[in-house]
């Protein structure tokens, strides 16, 4: 299915996005940097450098040890995640969802990924995808996100573009690029009636199938400006009823087992 570009006039600029989020434009740039460099604190201030640059600090005869390099990388990585979490909290607030939605989605996805035998690296990627699944909404007007009534066809089209916009955002960051396909397809349905590309069944990346279920469950469970959250038993009914239509039946099975295990 060919992707149509969203109308430019209906997308907010970085300046408008910063105003909506109550931060500076520079903060937005720091949160979502479009290039290949990353922020790392040095004695001279904050400079954008790549992971490989960290590994090559110092003169040739005075290279840091592997432990020192990994410590630097770990510090950089966790600092970056802290910044992303701050952004997602702001995004949740814009979207009228109870605080912590993105974090909870990340937790649900991690739990399912663990049950499915994902490696540590794969779990790290899907957790990031869960944290950032809605990051594309930073480019959509708050008027549309918070509209209480029925959306027009054009407004709904723009909402459907947020996974595409999210993919474009994370593709510009080394740490996040692998999450792109999962963010893009986290609203595809197992029966092929989702968006943005109308993928079906195993055409949808496994991680995206996991994300879609995790996000739906948390939205059903959580209070928002649009509806009151459902109790656990009714939320489970919603997920079970949509098995093999919206959701991959195997993912539903794994998710319900993880709920039983955790006691949530």
Image (cartoon, rainbow, N blue to C red):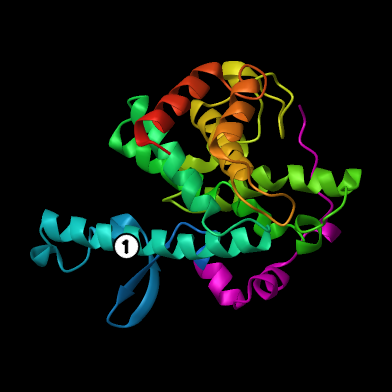
220 or 42: nearer the viewer: 220
Instruction: Find out whether residue 178 is within the magenta segment.
Output: no
Q: Is residue 191 visible?
A: yes
Q: Which residue is mark 1?
A: 76
Q: Is residue 181 visible?
A: no
The quarter of the displayed image where residue 94 is located:
bottom right
Where residue 123 sits: x, y (%)? 36, 38
Where residue 191 sits: x, y (%)? 69, 18
Could you tell me which quadrant the N terminus lies in?
A: top right
**Label 1 Cα crowd, 10 Å radius (few <14 / some 14-19 / many 20+):** some
Instruction: Kindly identify the residue that appears in the image at 62 percent across and 63 percent down.
Output: 93
Instruction: Kindly identify the residue that appears in the image at 20 percent across and 55 percent down.
Output: 70
Instruction: Find out whether residue 24 is within the magenta segment.
Output: yes
47 or 137: nearer the viewer: 137
Element assignment for label 1: helix
The quarter of the displayed image where residue 246 is located:
top right
Region rendered in magenta = 1-30
Instruction: Kindly identify the residue that appears in the image at 72 percent across and 49 percent down.
Output: 227
Horizontal side, residue 15 vs residue 208: left or right: right
Query: Which residue ends up furthest to the right in the rendered image?
Result: 152
173 or 220: nearer the viewer: 220
Q: With respect to residue 140, does 258 lie above or below?
A: above
Could you tell me which quadrant the C terminus lies in?
A: top left
Instruction: Kindly identify the residue that appears in the image at 70 percent across and 21 percent down.
Output: 192
């Amino acid at each position: 299915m060919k992707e149509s570009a969203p109308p430019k006039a209906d997308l907010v600029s970085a300046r408008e996005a910063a105003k909506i989020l109550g931060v500076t434009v520079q903060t937005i740039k720091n949160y979502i940097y479009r290039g290949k460099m990353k922020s790392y604190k040095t004695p001279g201030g904050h400079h954008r450098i790549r992971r490989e640059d960290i590994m090559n600090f110092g003169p040739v005869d005075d290279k840091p040890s592997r432990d020192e390099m990994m410590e630097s990388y770990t510090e950089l990585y966790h600092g970056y995640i802290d910044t992303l979490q701050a952004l997602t909290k702001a995004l949740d607030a814009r979207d009228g969802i109870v605080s912590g939605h993105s974090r909870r989605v990340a937790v649900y996805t991690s739990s399912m990924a663990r049950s499915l035998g994902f490696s540590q690296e794969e779990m790290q990627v899907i957790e990031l995808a869960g944290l950032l699944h809605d990051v594309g909404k930073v480019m959509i007007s708050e008027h549309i996100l918070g509209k209480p009534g029925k959306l027009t066809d054009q407004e709904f089209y723009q909402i459907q573009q947020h996974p595409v916009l999210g993919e474009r955002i994370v593709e510009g960051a080394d740490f996040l690029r692998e999450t792109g396909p999962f963010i893009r397809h986290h609203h595809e349905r197992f029966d092929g009636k989702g968006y943005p590309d109308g993928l079906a069944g195993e055409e949808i990346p496994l991680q995206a199938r996991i994300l879609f279920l995790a996000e739906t469950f948390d939205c059903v469970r959580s209070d928002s400006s649009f509806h009151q959250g459902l109790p656990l038993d009714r939320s489970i009914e919603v997920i079970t009823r949509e098995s093999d239509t919206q959701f991959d039946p195997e993912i539903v099975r794994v998710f319900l087992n993880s709920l039983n295990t955790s006691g949530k």
